[in-house]
Amino acid sequence: MPDIEDFRSRLLQEREKLLSLQATRDASTATVQLDQSSVGRLSRMDALQQQAMAQNTSQRVESTLRRIEGALRRCDDGSYGYCIDCDEPINERRLEFDPTAALCISCAEARDS
């Protein structure tokens, strides 16, 4: 059985790291200004591309934060380390790779197909 407190600690550290990144990314996703003097040497297309990349990163961070919160809830209610579909234990190596994993390999593969 996995060491729940170790995984909880890892999840909390990752959440803090992502929350601090979230604060810095807010400026990157702001609306691109039409005033070329505020954009500097970047063209408007470059600025739009950077904005789109920042928004994509923001969506990935939000998704990861939701998975972390779910894993922390499972730690609290005693269901961490068990598949949410079949209730079988999740392989500890899978949890080492992804502490937010909520599905065993079999159930994850079944959902992907």
Image (cartoon, rainbow, N blue to C red):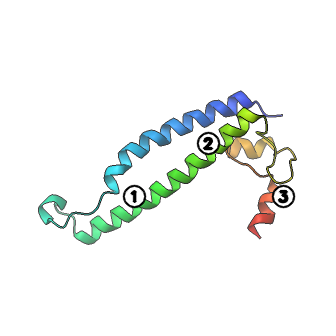
Q: Quadrant of residue 109?
A: bottom right
Amino acid type, label 1 = Ala
Residue at position x 46%, y 61% from top?
A: 56
Q: Mark 2 or 3 closer to N-term?
A: 2
Q: Give the quarter of the figure containing the N terminus.
A: top right
SS for callout 2: helix
Answer yes or no: do the residues labelled 2 and 3 have beta carbons within 8 Å?
Answer: no
User: Residue 48: where, in percent of width, then height?
Assistant: 31, 67
Q: Is 82 above or below relative to 16?
A: below
SS for callout 3: helix
Q: Quadrant of residue 31?
A: bottom left
Q: Give the quarter of the figure containing the C terminus.
A: bottom right
Residue at position x 54%, y 39% from top?
A: 15
Left or right, 60 with reference to 1: left
User: Residue 64: where, in percent of width, then height?
Assistant: 57, 49
Amino acid type, label 2 = Glu
Answer yes or no: do the residues labelled 1 and 3 have beta carbons within 8 Å?
Answer: no
Label 2 packing within 10 angstroms: few (<14), some (14-19), many (20+) = some
Comparing labels 2 and 3, the label whose residue is closer to the camera? 2
Comparing labels 2 and 1, the label whose residue is closer to the camera? 2
Q: Quadrant of residue 76?
A: top right
User: Residue 14: where, in percent of width, then height?
Assistant: 55, 38
Q: Is 63 above or below relative to 96?
A: below
Left or right, 3 with reference to 89: left
Q: Mark 2 or 1 closer to N-term?
A: 1
Residue on which the image places disc 2: 69
Determine the CA span between mark 1 and mark 3. 34 Å
Q: Which mark is residue 106?
A: 3
Residue on which the image places disc 1: 54
Q: Mark 1 or 3 closer to N-term?
A: 1
